[in-house]
Structures are given as C-alpha cells and as structure tokens.
Amino acid sequence: MAAQLVELEENFFNCPICLDSFRDPKLLPCLHRYCRGCVKPEVDKSDDKVKCPLCKQECDKPTDGVDGFKTDFHTRSVVEYIQLKKSVAAEEVRKCIGCSNELQVAAFCFKCRGFICRKCHEIHENNGIARDHKEHVLALKDVKDKHLTLEKLGSLKEAPSCSEHPEKLAEICCVDCNNLPICVVCGQYENHKGHTIRGVRELAAEERKKIEHSMKVLKEQDGNVRGFPAKLAEARKSLEVNITETKARIRSQYNEEVGKLNEEERESVGLLAQHKAEIDRKERAEVADLNRQRERELKTVNDKYDKCINKAKARAADERGEKDTAASKTKDVLTKKRSYLEKEFSDSISSVDHQGNTNMKTFGELFDQSDQRIHRYDNFVTIVSSVLASRDHWTDVSCLPDMNVSSKPLIEDAKKAFPEIATLSKVTPKVITPVFAPKANPAPIINRDDFKSDADYEKYVEEHLRIGMTVRCRKANQGVQEGDTGKVIEVSWYNNPNPTCQWQRLGCTQKVSYSDVEIVDQGVQVGSKVRLQLSAVNPSRDQEGVNPRSVGRVTATDGKNCTVEFPTKTHWKGLLSDVERVLLLRRSAFQVDGSYSAYVRDTISAGMTARCYKDDGMATVGDTGTVIRLKMDDSEPGQLRIEVKWQRQGEAHWVKHSSLEILGLRLLSVGDTVRAKQDITYISDILCARGDTGKITRICDDRRCQISFPRLRDWIVLFSQIELLP
C-alpha cells in the first residue's frame, strides 16, 4: 500500500466549497473534509443536525460547534507537502527559519516547521545539537522525486503535542477520549488518570486491522454499488414498456366496449322498428276485421263499430307511446353507460399515468441516491487508502476509528438490494367495469354454509344473481318476512343497486339487499319448463293464445328475454320476469323429510294438487286436494299454513306445509267455480262484471272454456280472464 503522492489527484486535497487547498481541515463523520471557515456557516445555522454539503448525510451537531469536529492532521500534512512542492517548482526565495536570511532554501524541517538554507541543512545533518531534527528533514531534491510515498512523508512528521501540555510531545493515547494524544504525566496523574491508556503502535495496529477488514468487505460490494445504476436503468426501461403496453390494452378494451354499445344501440333501434311494424300490422288487421263485421251487421250499428275502431286506434297509439317511452329509456340507459364507460376509460388511463409518473419520480430519487452512494463509496475508499498508505501510527490512531465508524453505515447501504425496483417497473391499471352483464350460463349454486362469513356469501350472491332465479329472505326487511321466497325480476349492472323480487307471501314486488337473501334455485334456463306468471304487473307481451296454466319449454334466453314453446302457441317471446319455472320433485327424491318440507314451502302455490302424507287436523293420510291460499303461521316461525279443498271431504281445511306432498299442477275442469278477473264486454255492453262468479260447463281447448254466469249463460272466455275459487 505504498501509494505514491503523485497518484493522488491534487484537487482531492481542495475544499469542495472554496475549491482551494484546505485551511485547518475539519473532518465530518461521513469522512468529507472542509475548511474550518467554509463549513462554519453551515454548522452555525443548523439546529440539532448538521447536513454534509456533498452527500447530504446528517450527523449530530457538536456542543462547541465547528470546533467539535476533528481536525484532519493527515490531510493538513499532505496539503503542506503540496504547497512545499509548488514552492520548489517555482524556485522561490524564502526566509530561512534557522539563520533568518533571505536565501534559496535547500530543505524543509518538519520539526522546525519551516524552510532552511543549504548551510542550516548541513548543520541539521551533521551537528549533534540538531541530531533529533535529522530524521524530520526533507531535502528539496526529494520533493522532486516521483517515488516519494505517503509512508515516507509520514515518517518525517513529528509526534503531535500533548493536548494538555503543548510543550511536550504525546507518547500515549487515551482510548476513552477518542484516542486523544497525551503525555505520560496526563495519563498517570492528571485529567486522564483511570482512563484506558494504550500505546500508539499497539493501538494503530489494532485500528489498521479493523479498517482493512472494512475495506475488504467494501471491495466485495463494489460490483453491487457500481452495477446499481444499470439495474435502475433496466427497470425504468421495463416500466416505460409496461406503460405503453398497458395503455394499448386499455384502449383495446375501451374500443371493444364502445363496439358493444354501438351494437346494442343498433339492436334497440331495430327492435323499436319491429315493435312499431307489429303494432301497425295488428292495427290494420283489427281495423280490417271490424270493417268486415260492420259490413255484415245492420246499418244501425255503424256508430258502435266506429267507436270500436277509435278505441283500437287509441290502444295502438298508447302502445306506440309505451314503446317510444321504453325506447327512450333504453337510449338514456345506453347514454349513461357510454358516459360511465368514458369516465372509466379516462380514470384507467389517468391511473396508469399517475402510477407511471410516481414511479418515474421514484426512479429519479433512486438514481440520486445511487450517485450519492457511489460518491460516498469512492470518497471513503480514497481517503482510507490515503491514510493506510501513510503508515503513520499517529495518523492511524487519529483517523481510523472515525473511518471504522463511518464504514458500518456505508457497508449496510452498499448491501441494500432494493427489491422495490421490480414493483416500480410495473403499473396496475384500474379495471374497466363491463357495462353489460355476462351472458354465460349461471354457475352452480353454492350454499351459505360453504362460506366463512356473511360478507363472502353476500359478494357471491351479488356476482351470480340473475333474473329468473329463486331466492329466500334470510332476514326480515322492507316488509318481506324471513323465509319468504320470491323470483328475481330485475338486476341492474349499472352502479350495482339492490335486486327487485316478486315475493310469494308479500304478494308484490320489493327491493331487498344482497345481504338479506340466499339463492335457492338458478331460475329459468334453456330447457326449463315454465308457465305464465299471472301476478306479473304489465306483462311484456300479449298473453292471449296461451293457457295461464299451460306448461311450455324454454328454447332460448339471453338473461333478460326468453323464447318459449307452448302447446297452443309456438315461439312465444317475452321477458323472464313474465314466466315462472315449474319444477316439481317427488318426496322420494329427498333423503331427509326436513329438506322436502323446505322444498314444499318454497314451491307450493295456489292451484297446485297436493296429498296429505301425515295426519294434520281434519286431513288424514292419503287425502288429495287443491291448494287455495297460503299464509304464515304466527305461532310457529318458519311454518307455512295452507288452505286445501280436500276431495274426500268436499271441504277446505288448513294444514301445515310439512304435512303435504306436491302432486302436480291443477288444471281447470268442468264444474269448477271461477270468478271473473275483469269486465267481459261485447261491443259496448257489459256481459259480465269483474267479480261475478260462475261454473265451467265445457272445456273448449287449451286456452278457452265455456262458463255459465248469472247474467250470461254459456259464454266462451279465455282462461286469462278468470280465476279458480275454492
């Protein structure tokens, strides 16, 4: 480690603030050095912490200000040598410190701390009076020698003075006082009595061993420190590529969603045109039929037919208005979805830009930190190498302890792996929520018991609930009783509101929270057997031509609309909310009576045929009958009371749902008592008022029957115009 002085850059010994040679250099804990006068303003204006002007590392402010920082005697000696070298090169004439004459100097005495002439140099070399000066004299010819080493320069310096007795040279060091040079008197009798005292050679060897170990560790981390900028550059490049690819994916998804919106808009316009064309066709057919009837009737009834024609046109106008209103609502919904999609796209792009800018800023900070780490690393290696090359014990004792302390945070900093670089090179965009519900078949139902918490099951219900599914109320709310079952008739995919259900016991529609229901049936799918739901309000299609109790098979569904094949009407089209699924299971299909009892409670409705399979009040095992109505049993929670007209007894009695077995659907037959659900008119005369009762005298076909009413005998009506009475 015999480093030559010429190998050290001259500006290494210049103050970073004034850019001139050090004057009374002060050493900070980070091993950066500054002139005392240059760094003093920075120290004075600091509060508790002093920040290094170069590496920005903070340290505690000494109580006595700038004088609390160590003076770098090693650097001061090297600076003196550099100034000496400049003087020799300029062949300056100086005052000899020995004879006080203005002569060309021949040497420099480090003990006298001044230049001496040739004659005084000979006295230092040969006279016994100055024999203790001989080993501290540097001839000017040696200054020009390029092989002058820091080790040789260190041997010329005299031991420092005692801190308490400046007239004495230090002989030992006080370890407790930060390796302070002291004389023997101070160590044994005065201020340092009782402190840990060490010899300078022994202490220097120990400190040199410590710093050599730290240098070895730092050299092992050299590749990690110097290779870090390349890793940062590679990660930043990956981030830029990721941002570009992510934006491209978002734009592709946006374009796909816009295409779906445009397609839905075209379908809506086409559907409106189809509706209007169908209305026009029905209007023309009805007007033509009425015209033919008017031609066959007497001329006196022309006015009545004119009224009927006007009513038909008015109904057609109302239907057109309804369709226009529905189309307008659909257009408004699509406009809202488009605005929502635009906002989602903008937010997603903004989130990518924000994350990218944030990560880029972080990369910039990491590059700055990396530059500072490399600067601290190079500074540490250079100054330590300089001190080690001097091989001066007093320099080792004075400088190496601080350098050992400074090496620890430097080693820890050099070992940092910075794992966050991998995450900084990526961006996570905000996912664009689809504006259309998926049209895939619903997933299999998962029971509530399969989930760890109510929150997890609520999320499952929210994601899988579809129109036509059957649900059960788990918690009474909004007038819906616990245990009541209903069919989902509306689920909106915009802003995720609560679903609307048609409840069996409540007898009307009501919105409920996802957390208050559980799915018990997946509802109508292709192949399901269904019937018209007579309780539906404002059915979406004309129900004429379909027996209200007829069962058909679903041939197509898109999650909102469906196509059904009925016995008397093929290709019937309507909303899923207009039909109800018919699913009848026998008691033998259940292994536990409690499971079948729950099935009966959820499925049974008025008009069904049931059998009593255990005695219950007036009903005995084996009795069959028709269900008339249902109600909750207030005395027994969860129990449903059902009124059944029993075949053997000919009377109606109430039984529990747990005593019944469902046999099938009840079709109307001759002799049944029915009630008119609406006024039955012919031209302008009311033949039968709403609420009138009568008996079925003949079943005409699958959609009509003949009834004898009090004011009208043997009149043929549609099944949709009447309801069964007990």
Image (tube, grey):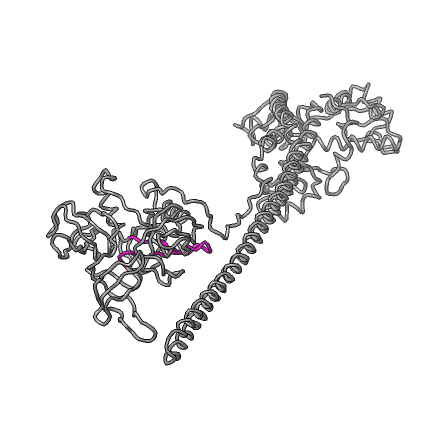
Q: Is residue 179 left or right of residue 378?
A: left
Residue 215 visible in the snapshot = yes
| Residue under the image location 21 percent in, 53 percent down | 640
**Tally of numbered tags:** 0
Q: Position of residue 105 (x, y in %)?
A: 86, 29
Looking at the picture, tell me which residue is in the foreground, 231 or 432. 432
Q: Quadrant of the C terminus?
A: bottom left
395 or 639: nearer the viewer: 639
Name above or below for residue 554 compared with residue 682: above
Which residue corresponds to the image point at 58% horizontal and 23% vertical from the top-left?
198
- Vertical arrangement, residue 430 with respect to residue 302, above or below: above
Q: Position of residue 361 (x, y in %)?
A: 63, 45
Where, by quadrant of the figure, is residue 110 drawn?
Answer: top right
Q: Nearer the viewer, residue 98 or 430?
A: 430
Residue 487 falls within the magenta-colored stretch: yes
Camera-side residue: 501 or 615? 615
What percent of the width, then of the height, locates residue 535? 31, 60
Horizontal side of residue 574 vs 516, given as left or right: right
Res. 66 in view: no
Image side of residue 85 versus residue 265, left or right: right
Magenta part of the protein: which range? 485-506
Q: Is residue 359 magenta?
A: no
Q: Residue at x 73, y 40 (%)?
A: 16
User: In this rendering, is residue 234 above or below 264?
Assistant: above
43 w.r.t. 319: above or below:
above
Image quadrant where residue 373 sits: top right
* Residue 286 point in image, percent of width and height: 43, 68
Q: Quadrant of residue 691?
A: bottom left
Give the quarter of the figure containing the N terminus.
Answer: top right
